[in-house]
Amino acid sequence: MDKLFNMDNKFFSFMGRAADLFMLNVVFVICCLPVVTIGASLTALHYVTLKMARNEESMSGVPEWCFAFLYVGKNFMI
């Protein structure tokens, strides 16, 4: 019974990753509303998705999709 509610089992890991990808897409759509920022938003989406796929997520406890706003700003200023 203890294994069923363990937060490290495969179901909760999958659902956590699916929620992170959903929120990352929401951030992408919000950042794409001004048409000028589509390139920077797409670059940030690609960068964060690759970091998630390589399991290079931050150790600060903050979900990786939160950093997408920072990457959009960084890419837009270049």
Image (cartoon, rainbow, N blue to C red):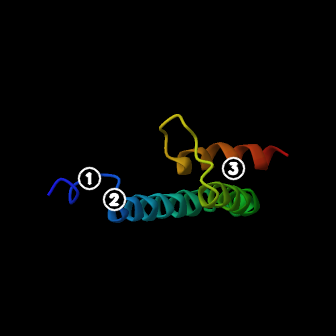
- Labelled pair 1, 3 in contact (Cβ < 8 Å): no
Q: Earlier in the sequence, mark 1 or mark 3?
A: 1
Mark number for residue 6?
Answer: 1
Q: Nearer the viewer, residue 38 or 6?
A: 6
The answer to the question of whether label 1 and label 2 lie on touching residues, with beta carbons closer than 8 A, is: yes
The x, y position of residue 37, in whole percent, is 72, 57
- Going 59% across and 56% down the picture, which residue do you hit? 52
Name the amino acid, label 2. Asn
Distance from disc 2 to disc 3, alpha carbons, whole Å, reads 33 Å
Disc on res. 72: 3
* Distance CA(mark 1)–CA(mark 3): 35 Å
Which residue has dot 2 on it? 9
Which quarter of the figure has residue 47?
bottom right
Number of the front mark, 1 or 3: 1
Q: Are marks 2 and 3 in contact (CB under 8 Å)?
A: no
The CA span between labels 1 and 2 is 6 Å
**Which of 4/45 is in front?**
4
Question: Residue 22: image x %, image y %?
Answer: 46, 64
Identify the residue shown where x is 53% and y is 58%.
24
Q: Residues within 10 Å of mark 1 (few under 14, many from 20)?
A: few
61 versus 57 height, above or below: above
Residue depicted at x 54% and y 56% = 27
- Mark 3 belongs to which amino acid? Val
- Secondary structure at numbered mark 2: loop
Q: Residues within 10 Å of mark 3 (few under 14, many from 20)?
A: many
* Element class at badge 3: helix
Disc 2 vs disc 3: which is toward the camera? Answer: 2
Q: Amino acid at mark 1?
A: Asn
Q: Residues within 10 Å of mark 2 (few under 14, many from 20)?
A: few
Outermost left residue: 1
Q: Which label was assigned to residue 23?
A: none
